[in-house]
Amino acid sequence: MNSSQEPHAGPDTGPPESGLPTAEWGAEQRQGDDTDAPEDGYFGASVAENYDDPSSDMFAPAAVEPAADLLAALAVGGPALEFGIGTGRIALPLARRGVPVHGIDLSRAMVEKLRAKPGGDAIGVTIGDFASTVVPGRGGFAVAYLVFNTIMNLTTQAEQVACFRNAAAHLAPGGTFVIEVGVPELRLLPPGQNAVPFQITANRWAFDHYDVATQAMSSNYVEVVDGRGSYRSIPFRYVWPAELDLMAQLAGMRLRDRWEGWGREPFTNESGRHVSVWEKAASADQPDGANPANRGDQLGA
Ligand SMILES: C[S@@+](CC[C@H](N)C(=O)[O-])C[C@H]1O[C@@H](n2cnc3c(N)ncnc32)[C@H](O)[C@@H]1O
């Protein structure tokens, strides 16, 4: 897959596709090195230090500028909220287009890197989990967005649903929620097997491991350097486009557009990723699932 910490993007691709820098994938510890604060999750100081990689495709203007353009067009001058803002790869160019941006992120280390960049101190950031954290301006954002496969960092369906509900709660009526995420690569999984190798070199072996019963998956990296072995495993939950649409519906949103990329390329059955846009209904027009009184979890209350 291609994404946020996502698994890879196909054969011979690996760490860079995951949203973590290549250098970090050799680290022995599950979440970076021993100096990383556990509360920063998988994006501690050792990862944040090398996260911005100008040589990576994801940092190239060809990747960043169309994303900022599309998000600015959706914001139409209103405020934007980024879930998992990180070092501001997308937030900063979006802010340069005149869009007020607020972010949520678990990792103080990543946000420190954002703060150190020109314009970074003008972006409000709330430290917390984007599945549940409430920020000032709730109910008034024109657009909320979650890019680079970061929805997959939420490793249960319940958390992913909560993320949609949190996004919807922060949007103004008619506002949009945008996700960029890979299409699950289960077609690479032969019958009877649960692992797909995606990088094999003389000293490095990497594979995705799938649990198709739960949609849990992990990207796993084994490396030998100077005769010393290391292993790293990053957990994800893969999620289908149609499942995301249902999560949106539960949160009172409906699909407005789905493209293969930020350039609004058509989404086809060969697309490896999608950029999807859901729109929050106006209050008079809410689907049943958006009305708390109509939710299944309210039955019997
Ligand atoms: C792959 S990076 C993406 C950063 C940035 N959006 C970009 O496109 O470069 C994922 C970011 O999401 C943050 N993150 C992951 N799970 C999170 C969660 N549940 N709540 C808040 N932030 C989270 C990480 O700390 C990290 O900064």
Image (tube, grey):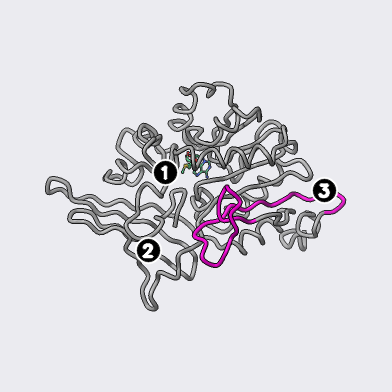
Q: Quadrant of residue 243?
A: bottom right
Q: Is residue 222 left or right of residue 215?
A: left
Q: Residue furthest right?
A: 284
Q: Mark 3: give few (<14), some (14-19) or many (20+) Cα within 10 Å.
A: some
Q: Can residue 275 be seen at all in this image of the molecule?
A: yes
Circle 1: element type: helix
Circle 2: element type: strand
Q: Relative to 49, does residue 229 appear above or below in the rendering? A: below
Q: Can residue 37 be seen at all in this image of the molecule?
A: no
Ligand 1 within 8 angstroms of badge 2 C-beta:
no
Q: Give the magenta part as a residue range.
A: 258-285
**Residue pointed to by mark 2:** 209
Q: What's the CA distance linking mark 3 and mark 2?
A: 41 Å
Q: What's the CA distance linking mark 1 and mark 3?
A: 38 Å
Q: Tell me the number on the disc at residue 24.
A: none
> Where's the N terminus, which quadrant?
bottom left
Mark 3 vs mark 2, foreground winner is 3
- Ranked by sequence position, the earlier of labels 3 and 2 is 2
- Residue 37 place in picture, x, y as percent: 39, 34
**Residue pointed to by mark 1:** 57
Q: Relative to 105, does residue 298 appear above or below in the rendering? A: below
> Mark 1 is on which residue type?
Asp
Q: Residue at x 72, y 33 (%)?
A: 78
Q: Mark 1: give few (<14), some (14-19) or many (20+) Cα within 10 Å.
A: few
- Residue 222 forms part of the magenta stretch: no
- Residue 265 forms part of the magenta stretch: yes
> Mark 3 is on which residue type?
Ala
Q: Residue furthest left?
A: 227
- Residue 186 place in picture, x, y as percent: 45, 68
**Residue pointed to by mark 3:** 282
